[in-house]
Amino acid sequence: MTSGILLLSTLFLLILVGVPVAYAFLGAGLIFVVVALDVPAAPLVAQATTGGADSIPLTAIPLFLLAGSLMNAGGITRRLVEFASVLFGRLPGGLGVVNVGTNVFFSGISGSAAADASAIGKAMIPGMAAQGYPRAFSAALTSTASIIGPIIPPSIPLIVYAIAANQKIKPLLVAGILPGLLLAAVLMVMVIVLALRRNYPRQGLVSARVAVLATRDSLAALLMPGIIIAGIVFGWFTATEAAAVAVLYALLLSTVFYRELDWRRLPAVFLDAARSSAVILFIIAAAAVLGQVFVRTGFPSALADTLGVLGPVLFLVVVNLILLVFGTFMEGNAAIIIFTPLLLPTAVALGIDPIHFGIIVVFNLMIGLVTPPVGMSLFISSNIARLPILTVARANIPFLAAALVTLVAITFWPQLSLALT
């Protein structure tokens, strides 16, 4: 137990002093191997990194990121925004509700909060500001709404959890549908309440002609998330095959149907997706080294013995607190890889379904994306709005509260996650 605590302390110290997460994983693991374990470092690192990244399901990650990049460049994202505006624009806080609705549509394709925050933020934050919404409000809402993306399938963090937990990917992805929709509904209610209290503007009534044109223009784009989610739910294809379908569909829509993406711009789109993919896959490979070292310290079994005496309710409360804290300064996928092997055995021993537990883990860590100091979605939205991150963080308090209320419901209402699986 002491060895594991020292290893964790080394890891968090490296992260706190600004070492990039992947290098912190490698550094902490190597330091501990050299100092405390009688094991050759080079073979352990080589085996762990290749084993950690050598997984067929992981190929879904770069493909979904590529699909998101193609959507941004090919006008698909813009059309989803226009359709959401037709649906929700007349409600109080209409553009805020449109923001959340667009995230729901987009989440059925991208699987990444960062992709959602970037794509939708560039479209919605300036547009909301032009209509009289405070930029801090718009940026805060965009950041929190973006975490719907990693909950509703296809979800990159849930794929990572499935690999770390040795679970089937399809049930996990299906389990995220209702929690993701619940979060969207709670955020929409919060937007409406704030809009009424603060007298935010409403959009004018959209004419039938404009509504028909927007719907017709966005129909092909709307089919994309429907095809992906239906394909996964009904077993038409695996998550990896769904990612390939998403790329092909987005490519055809962008280049042939909408004709907004010419072939000369494709290399830049592919390069953007490749960079994002490399970061995630490098973190996964580096985290595998740390995972191997953790196992050799005996820390997982000691932690399981300690938490196993708490009982399922208190255990879930403690897990939520642990993940919420660490999610504020750890990259989500990396934290999933670290904490899943540590906490899942105890959860299963206490009778908690591993699918339900996976939704809890991912939801907790996605909340970390909208909390300082790391808060990637918060950072992206703040950058788009050109505001200090703390200004946006203060404006985000109501939406963060909405996400926490949703987390409580997900934690203690297992059927919310398991009803569709």
Image (cartoon, grey):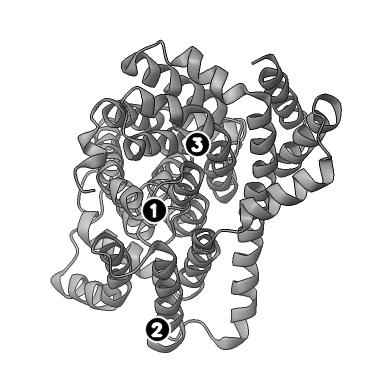
Query: Quick check: 348 left or right of 202?
Result: right
Residue 49 in the image: state x and y as whole percent: 70, 50
Instruction: Name the one closer to the observer, 332 or 299.
Output: 299
In this figure, which residue is indicated by the disc labeled 2? 258
Residue 288 on image: x %, y %: 65, 43
Q: Amino acid at mark 2?
A: Tyr
Secondary structure type for disc 3: helix
Residue 261 vs 165, above or below: the answer is: below
Disc assigned to residue 370: 3
**Which SS class for mark 2?**
loop
Residue at 27% across / 65% down in the picture? Answer: 235
Distance between mark 3 and mark 1 Cα atoms: 26 Å
User: What is the spatial separation of the Cα atoms under label 3 and label 2, in whole angstroms?
Assistant: 34 Å
321 vs 195, left or right, is right
- Image height of 28 relative to 108, above or below: above
Sequence-wise, which precedes: disc 3 or disc 2? 2
Residue reaching furthest left? 208
Q: What is the three-letter code of the residue carrying label 1?
A: Ile
Residue at 49 percent of width and 63 percent of height = 60
Query: Badge 2, how many Cα within 10 Å: few under 14, some, many 20+?
Result: some
Q: CA distance from mark 1 to mark 2?
A: 33 Å
Amino acid carrying label 3: it is: Val
Q: Residue furthest front?
A: 38
Residue contact at pointers 3 and 1, CB within 8 angstroms: no
**Pointer 1 or 2: first along the chain:** 1
In this figure, which residue is indicated by the disc labeled 1? 169
Residue at left offset 60%, top offset 73%: 270
Q: Quadrant of residue 25?
A: top right
Rendered location of residue 10, percent (x, y): 75, 25
